Image: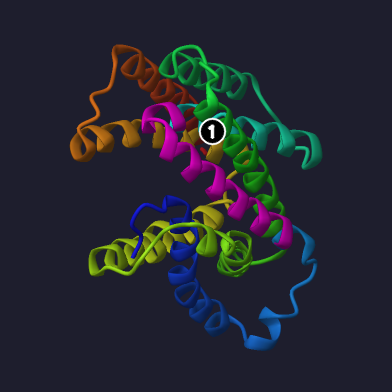
Amino acid sequence: MVRSAKRCLCLFQSFFAFPFVFYFAVRRSSLKEFFNLKPFWPLLLSGIMLGVNWIFFFWAVKITDIATVVTIYYAGPVISILLAAFFLKERINFFTVVSILLALAGVAVSSGGFNMDKGAVIAMLAAVSYGLLGFFSKVSTLYHEAVMVTTWQILISIFITLPFLFWADWHFTIDGFLVTLVAGVIHTALALFLWYDALNYIKVSFASILQYLDIVFAVILAYLFLFQVPTVQQVLGAFLIVVAGSLIFVKEAESEN
């Protein structure tokens, strides 16, 4: 479906994801309740941030390598943690601070010290919108079920990304259709639902630190499928990120016992 228009991918994945999550949202409640959710403002803001986040992320991926994008991109969870601590009064303990610093060190090492070229700047804008997305999503889950949050976010993101349908060069192909369908249903609808459902049970700080493991998987998958060999810096950065995630996970597990 998409030829040289990665910017259209965020639109099509939302388009294919929406019927899937909309069905479960209406089945769990009702059509009337779906259109009568209050307060609506956190859903609106989180949906806008989802669309803006995808635009910046795919733009960055188009002009620079994946490892650079994902390492800078994951400065976003730190923004989520700080916003949650300030506005939602989530407590940040010593281990959370250490984990944040380790994760940021991993990001810095992996990206070569935050070399801010054009791609890096766009990736940083994606990181800011990602952090705001995490915060507004947490606020949304305080009032609404995860499936409702996911459905409204995807619906709003369709309108945010719709202009790229007319700006980008694309055409229909069977392979593109199948890839975009999988990206919409599994990597968007299912992934977002699991993420927002998790926010009902864990703090933003815990969830945000665990997100750093995405960098490790991204580097591995880029090596296996795109033949992008990770540098020593990227491997070291990934190791620091894993340590950060493991530290916060162990501490949270101890607090539950």
Q: Is residue 200 visible?
A: no
Left or right, 37 with respect to 172, comes to right
Q: Is residue 250 magenta?
A: no
Residue 155: horizontal and vertical position, in percent? 59, 69
Quarter of the rendering containing residue 157? bottom right
Query: From the image, which quarter does the N terminus lie in?
Result: bottom left
Identity of the residue drawn at 29% across and 63% down? 176
Q: Is residue 50 magenta?
A: yes
Left or right, 241 with respect to 218, comes to right
Above or below residue 175? Residue 218 is above
Q: Is residue 205 visible?
A: yes
Left or right, 134 with respect to 193, comes to right
Q: Nearer the viewer, residue 95 or 55?
A: 55
Residue 76: horizontal and vertical position, in percent? 59, 34
Q: Which residues are magenta?
A: 44-69
Identity of the residue drawn at 77% across and 66% down? 40
Above or below residue 163? Residue 29 is below
Identity of the residue drawn at 63% across and 60% down? 160
Q: Residue under label 1, please give it.
A: 123
Mark 1 closeness class: few <14, some 14–19, many ≥20 residues within 10 Å: many
SS for callout 1? helix
Q: Nearer the viewer, residue 44 or 96?
A: 44
Residue 119: horizontal and vertical position, in percent? 50, 29
- Residue flagged by tag 1: what amino acid is it? Ala
